[in-house]
Image (cartoon, rainbow, N blue to C red):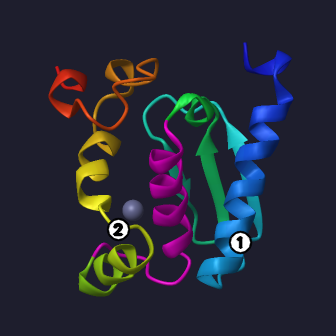
Amino acid sequence: MMKTSLYPTQELRRRALAWAVKLRVNPRVIRVQDMRRKWGSCSSAGTVTLASDLVDQDPRFQDFVIAHELLHLRVPTHGRLFKALMSAHVPGWRELEELRAVPRSGLGRRRNGAHHTSHEARR
Ligand SMILES: [Zn+2]
């Protein structure tokens, strides 16, 4: 399915690049690929990976995942500094975070429920 629609994937990468500028981080690579268990990841080598089906999610949720992963290039842990930076750049991120941890099978295709109905997205 993703192979026929390159454009949204490029759009997602572009969005991530814009965030990298905004957050003043310099990822080595930003890639978009199928990820079944997470929405994104960041390696210590500077590779940020975003789940391809993130393109179907609400832009606010996309921003949340992108900012989260990119900020790991500055702060590797989820400690106080990380949370402060998230609050500065993605107001309201805490409500989105619950969705991030939800098993992917419960969330991937819920376009409209992306950020309002976290209770629904849970098992
Ligand atoms: Zn993290």
- Quadrant of the picture in which ligand 1 is shown: bottom left
Please tell me which of labels 1 and 2 falls first in the chain. 1
Left or right of 2 on screen, residue 37:
left
Q: Nearer the viewer, residue 10 or 73?
A: 10
Instruction: Give the residue number, with chain letter if any, for mark 1.
Output: 27
Q: How many marks?
A: 2
Dot 2 lies on which element?
Answer: loop
Local packing at callout 2 (Cα closer than 10 Å; few below 14, some 14-19, many 20+) is: few
The numbered mark at residue 91 is 2
Are the residues tagged 1 and 2 within 8 Å (C-beta)? no
Viewport quadrant of the C terminus: top left
Q: Which residues are magenta?
A: 58-78
Image coordinates of residue 47 in percent, x first then y, are: 68, 62
Image coordinates of residue 85 in percent, x first then y, are: 39, 81
Dot 1 lies on which element?
Answer: loop
Foreground tag (1 vs 2): 2
Residue 58 in the image: above or below residue 89: above
